[in-house]
């Protein structure tokens, strides 16, 4: 017999006889000759109310059901007599698939996010985290749908690499060497003896590989896990996160900004249209201003200003920041949030950053000082997208690599792409978890990824 899903049953117009559903008990209420249970099967936020009466086989046995137990329920879907729900199931038979122990921690009461992080293996069974992870799933779908409609090719870039795309040195090194570690005569680790014969690490970005594919297939994107050994315990950094990275041939910085803005608006609209129930829960229990924030973003023209103008605004703001504002310094989260939340009250795209604070691959502008970078900042999060037009000119790229102390030998293949049919091209990276924070109103990145990796935390 086929298992029905609650999300489908709730959409039905007519009663249905002889159905089977399976799920976990959320609550149970006893009456004299029968009891009610609320079952959730994860297919949607709503539970199905089940009525089990004395006539049900093994009644006294199944009456011992505890919260968290897994059950199979056979019965008839009927109009609910009580308020609160349209349908309920009059059970004719019930099997306990497994009885949860009495110590099941998710009894009916509200728990703090901090506590739920300590039971990350169970928190998906709460309303809130169930909703967040369903939205996460839909959103991933929406990403593929967006690019498919725009004619992009979905590519897979390596998780294990020998390069450091961002040059920030926040790499998780990968090795199969065991002590005693082989050393070179000059006292360094001898990676020629390691698995790949050279130093290797988990990728911080698929960009360099994506560029190679863009220079063959035109418009491509990659959407996969990336890793950063940043030792920062903030509410918007994790060590393992997912990044959406489109890369477009024959595209300049303006085209890149257009794509970033379009993508963000599309994905927010997609979730509003496809996850109404789960989003409503977030708007009710996570952030009361959520829907207004999202509607503002969708309807706004994002502000576009050069980095220099942003610094001017910050310097004139008379705001007291913990980190000093200066030309040539990177913006801190507080600066980003001031610009997008207080000054402009909408998303802001900053472009043309000083070359000294950006990676080697960004295209040098004619002023010889700035590069064609663009970051998209959004309220509550700060930086959501980081991207650039890429340096497609061989000599310029070589020069910039020398400044960044990168060996042209190890990046020979990247340089070679500039020798054979190089073209202007651009792309960006959008942090998937940060987008989820924006869309759900969740304020800590640890709560939008099922098993967050942060310094000192890899238990689950
Ligand atoms: O600005 P980033 O470092 O850009 C790149 O890696 C480029 N190579 C992408 C490209 O052009 N293809 O990172 C891109 C985005 C950030 O804007 C942010 O949303 C997210 O990735 N991000 C993080 N999200 C969570 N935790 C972290 N530690 C993150 N670091 C970056
Ligand atoms: Mg960045």
Image: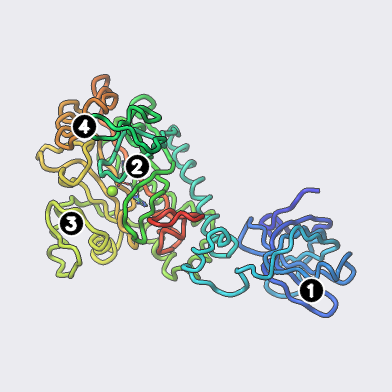
In front: label 1 or label 3: 1
Direction from residue 23 to residue 316 in the image, left or right: left
Mark 3–mark 4 distance (CA, rounded to whole Å): 47 Å
Q: Earlier in the sequence, mark 4 or mark 2?
A: 4
Q: Secondary structure at mark 3?
A: helix
Label 1, on which residue? 35
Residue placed under numbered mark 3 in the picture: 310
Q: Quadrant of residue 6?
A: bottom right
Between disc 3 and disc 4, the foreground one is 4
Gap between marks 3 and 2, in whole Å? 27 Å
Residue 212 in sight? no
Kind of element beneath mark 1: strand
Q: Which mark is residue 204?
A: 2
* Displayed quadrant of residue 123: bottom right
Q: Are marks 1 and 3 in contact (CB under 8 Å)?
A: no
> Which of the two labelled residues, at mark 3 and mark 4, occupies the earlier sequence position?
4
The number of callouts visible is 4
Sequence-wise, which precedes: disc 2 or disc 1?
1
Determine contact: label 3, label 4, CB under 8 Å. no
How far apart, in angstroms, are the residues tagged by discs 2 and 1? 54 Å
Q: Secondary structure at mark 2?
A: loop
In the displayed structure, does residue 96 sit left or right of residue 426? right
Image disc number at residue 396: none
Mark 4 highlights which residue? 186
Task: Give residue 142's position: percent from left, percent from top.
Answer: 49, 46
Ligand 1 within 8 Å, label 1 CB: no
């Amino acid at each position: 017999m086929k298992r029905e899903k609650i999300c489908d049953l709730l959409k039905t117009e007519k009663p249905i006889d002889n159905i089977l559903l399976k799920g976990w008990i959320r609550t149970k209420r006893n009456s004299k000759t029968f009891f009610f249970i609320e079952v959730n099967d994860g297919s949607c936020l709503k539970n199905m109310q089940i009525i089990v009466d004395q006539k049900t086989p093994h009644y006294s046995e199944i009456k011992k059901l505890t919260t968290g137990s897994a059950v199979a329920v056979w019965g008839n879907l009927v109009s609910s007599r009580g308020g609160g729900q349209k349908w309920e199931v009059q059970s004719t038979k019930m099997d306990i698939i497994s009885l949860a122990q009495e110590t099941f921690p998710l009894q009916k009461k509200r728990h703090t996010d901090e506590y739920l992080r300590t039971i990350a293996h169970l928190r998906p069974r709460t309303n809130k985290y169930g909703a967040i992870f369903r939205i996460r799933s839909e959103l991933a779908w929406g990403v593929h749908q967006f690019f498919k409609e725009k004619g992009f090719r979905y590519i897979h870039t390596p998780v294990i690499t020998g390069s450091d795309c961002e040059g920030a040195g926040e790499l998780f090194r990968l090795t199969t060497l065991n002590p005693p570690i082989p050393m070179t005569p000059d006292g360094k680790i001898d990676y020629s003896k390691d698995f790949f014969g050279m130093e290797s690490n988990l990728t911080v970005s698929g960009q360099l590989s994506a560029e190679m594919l863009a220079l063959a297939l035109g418009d491509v994107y990659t959407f996969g896990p990336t890793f950063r050994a940043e030792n920062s315990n903030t509410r918007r950094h994790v060590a393992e996160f997912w990044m959406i990275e489109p890369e477009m041939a024959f595209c300049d910085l303006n085209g890149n900004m257009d794509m970033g803005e379009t993508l963000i608006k599309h994905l927010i609209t997609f979730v509003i249209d496809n996850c109404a129930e789960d989003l409503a829960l977030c708007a009710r229990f996570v952030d009361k201003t959520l829907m207004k924030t999202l509607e503002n973003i969708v309807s706004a023209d994002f502000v576009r200003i050069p980095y220099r103008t942003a610094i001017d605004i910050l310097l004139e703001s008379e705001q007291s920041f913990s980190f000093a504002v200066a030309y040539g310094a990177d913006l801190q989260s507080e600066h980003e949030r001031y610009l997008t939340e207080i000054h402009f009250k909408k998303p802001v795209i900053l472009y043309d950053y000083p070359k000294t604070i950006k990676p080697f691959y960004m295209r040098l502008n004619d002023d010889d000082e700035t590069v064609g970078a663009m970051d998209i900042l959004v309220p509550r999060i700060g930086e959501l997208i980081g991207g650039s037009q890429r340096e497609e000119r061989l000599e310029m790229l070589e020069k910039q690599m020398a400044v960044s102390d990168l060996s042209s030998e190890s990046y020979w293949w990247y340089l070679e792409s500039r020798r054979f049919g190089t073209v202007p091209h651009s792309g960006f990276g959008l942090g998937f978890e940060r987008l989820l924070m924006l869309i759900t109103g969740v304020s800590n990145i640890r709560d939008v990824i099922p098993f967050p990796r942060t310094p000192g935390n890899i238990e689950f």
